[in-house]
Amino acid sequence: MNTYEIKNINPTVEEFKYLCESVGWSDFINFEVVETSLKNSIYCVTVKEDDQIVGMGRIVGDGAIYFYIQDIVVHPTYQKNGIGKEIMNKLVEYLHTNAPDKAFIGLFASQGNESFYEKFDFKDYSPNMTGMFTVISKNS
């Protein structure tokens, strides 16, 4: 990762939107509230090449018991270059340094990406535990 700059800063709303659009997440995110969401992140990592954002990841949660790794995204042009791994390394390093004993660290893995997260000691606990979620839809 010699030409990439990794920093502990939040992306701008425009950078976040750019990355999300690059991987097809546009229909799943309300960009009108992204600024608040990013501001409320516990920890965020951005990766840039020549001042252009190419990847990001963040930690959200209550900062005490529950932490969730969220929005690990790398622009498709830059995927398979170890950027996602570097983002996860920074997030996990932050958690090992700052999260208390017995903290719960969760994430949702996209289908087919489970093995990537297993390298960071995340495990699939199904069928005994199932990751579930719902989305509030006010346009119905």
Image (spheres, grey):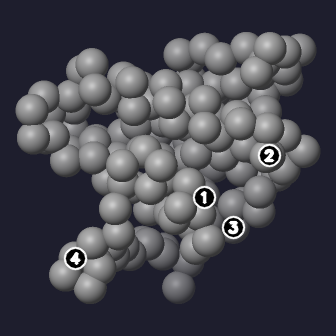
Indicate left or right for 96 with 88 as reference. Answer: left
Judging by the rendered image, the residue that carries numbered circle 2 is 79
Which x, y percent locates residue 63?
Answer: 22, 32
Disc 2 on helix, strand or loop? loop
Which x, y percent locates residue 55?
Answer: 71, 35
Residue 129 got which mark? 4
- Label 1: few (<14), some or many (≥20) within 10 Å? few
Disc 3 on helix, strand or loop? helix
Between the residue at mark 2 and the residue at mark 1, the CA separation in whole angstroms equals 21 Å
* Label located before the other in sequence (2 or 1): 1
Between the residue at mark 3 and the residue at mark 1, the CA separation in whole angstroms equals 6 Å
Cβ–Cβ under 8 Å for marks 2 and 4: no
Against 132, is 50 above or below?
Answer: above
Cβ–Cβ under 8 Å for marks 3 and 1: yes
Can residue 13 be seen here? The reply is no
- Label 2: few (<14), some or many (≥20) within 10 Å? few
Q: Residue at x 79, y 38 (%)?
A: 81
